[in-house]
Structure formats: structure tokens, C-alpha cells
Amino acid sequence: MSAKDLSYSAMPASPLPGSAMPGKLVSVGQAATEIEDEETLAYKASRRRALWRQRVMPGIGIAVLLFGWWAIVTGFHVKPFIAPSPLLVLQTLYEKRSILLSNLIPTAIEAAGGFFLGNFVAIVLATIFVHNKALNDIFFPVALMFNAIPVVAKAPVLVLLMGNGVEPKIAIAALVCFFPSLVNMVRGLNSPNPQALELMRVLSASKTEVFFKLRLYSSLPYLFSALRISASMAVIGAVVGEWIGATVGIGALIIQATFNFDSALLYSAIVMSASLSASFFLIVALVERAVVKWQPEQTL
């Protein structure tokens, strides 16, 4: 072999495209670590973007709304008895917090009672409708027609039937929550894959086993979607019931503040009712996140 051949053989082979240069060899473990680090950074970046969308962006929207409210009231010199400024409402929330909280508690009890009662009845009826098509065909249109009656028209009838206590308020809140949960629960119980239902039949599963092991799990996302709506609607139903006849509660406080031209107290009561609705909605969303773990993570 000539000296020229020896010189060529001694030279290191040129690196392939994408391979490490001589002196910069990377082990397999180090490469895997770098890939994991990149995936971790990408995951953290996506979490930051999600946090920005879920927390910061709504905060910006609320701040813009409050600033626009303040600018309109101040710029057009609106009288306080017509529309108070956000600062006056905030001051009223602090100064009359005892009155607001004492009226918030009955409304919260009525809304919570109506929420549980209406959704419980809706789940029971949906289960019956799914297992008995004849009853579904007979009574589901009746429920639809009953839901078409405005709540302000049903409220006086319930007050006449049940009196002026807490019962009609709970009943009104329950009626408001009932129909969305009924519709979504029926749809959810009928949502299992037909192949999965056929497999349960092949395995000689009873109707009870099919219900608890397949239909119920399939219906949970539909049910929680309805519960999110019901959580807010229950407060509306309780407030409407208090408008018809009550001496305590946020609805009664709104009526009193309106008759007294106390707009600051009126707006403060509205803020308290909205906060109560948001609290119920948040509780349902947190329960959904803990129960329905197989669904993609959703914003609150």
C-alpha cells in the first residue's frame, strides 16, 4: 500500500448530514434527555398559553368593561340614582355587606335546593324514558310544552299553590333546571356505541349492568354540560320566585332598591347574584374535572 493510500485511510470519514461533528459526539441517553427537555418546555409553554386564555384574558375583559362603565358614567355626568359608578357600587358592597350577605343566604339555599331537586328528577325521568320508549313518546313532548311556559308565568301559580314560603322558590328553581338536564341526560344515555351495547348483550349483561357500566359513563359529559347551565339558571329561578312574593333574598332586595331609587344597592345586589351564579358554575366545573377524567381538559 502506498503512502498516499495510507494518508487517505487515516483521514476520518466525512460526517453524514445531520450527524454529530467529530469532537461533539452525543450519547443516546443525552439525546433522549434533550428531547425530553424540549417536550417539557413545549408542555410548559402550552400550559402558560392556556393559563393566559383561562385567567388573564377574562380579567382583561372585566377590566375593560369596568373602565367603559366608569368612562360613560363620568363622561356623560349620569346621575347616581340612574346609574352609579363602579367605585360607588364597590363602596356600597363594603358598607352594606351585612344586608347583602343576609339576603344572599336565603337565595343560595333556594337555588341549591332547586338545583338538586330539578336535576335529580330529570335524571330519574331520563333513566325511565331510555328504558321505556312508550313513556318517552308520551311524556317527553309534555315536558317540552311545559318548558315553553315562561318562568314568570309559572311562578305566580306555584306561589298560589305552595304559599309564600321557601317552597315555591325552590320549585321555580327546580323547574328552570329540570328541562336542560332532562334533554342532555336522555341524549347521553342513548349515546353509547352500538357495538359496545351489542358486546354487553353478547356477554349476557343485565339492563342494570349495561346502565351502570356503559350508559351512565357515556352520559356524564352530557350531564355536566347541562349542570353548568343549571348552576346559573337555578339562581335566576330563585330570584324570580322572590320577585313574586318574598321579604328576604336577593330578589326581594332588588325590588326594594328599585322602589327606593337606590341604584347603588340595586347594582350591588345584581353583583351578588352574579357572583353566586359564578360560584355555582365553578363548583360544577371543578366536580366535572374530578369525575370526568377521560375527557380533554376544558376551561372553567
Image (cartoon, rainbow, N blue to C red):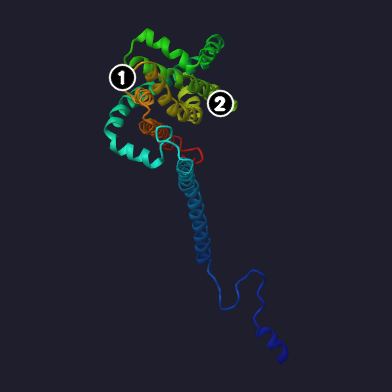
Q: Mark 1 falls on what kind of element?
A: loop
User: Which class describes the residues within 10 Å of circle 1: few (<14), some (14-19), or many (20+)?
Assistant: some
From this view, report whether residue 95 is shown above or below residue 24.
above
| 3 with respect to 22 (left or right) | right
Residue 1 visible to an observer of this rendering: no
Name the residue at 68% across, 88% down: 7
Residue 75 is situated, as x and y percent measured from the top left of the image, at 48, 44
| Residue highlighted by disc 2 | 191
Rendering coords of residue 76 (x, y %): 49, 40
Tell me the residue at 50%/55% (across/down).
Answer: 45
> In which quadrant of the rendered view does residue 26 lie?
bottom right
In the rendered structure, which disc, 1 or 2, sits on the residue that comes first in sequence? 2
Numbered disc 2: secondary structure: loop
In depth, the one of 57 and 73 nearer the eye is: 73
With 13 as the anchor, is 46 left or right in this view? left
Is residue 200 placed above or below 153 in the rendered structure? below
Q: Amino acid at mark 2?
A: Ser
Alpha carbon distance from label 1 to label 2: 45 Å
**Would you say 9 lies left or right of 97 here?**
right
130 up-or-down from 76: above or below: above
Q: Sort mark 2 into few (<14), some (14-19) or many (20+) by Cα contacts within 10 Å.
A: some
Quarter where residue 230 is shown: top left
Label 1 amino acid?
A: Thr
Q: Which residue is mark 1?
A: 247
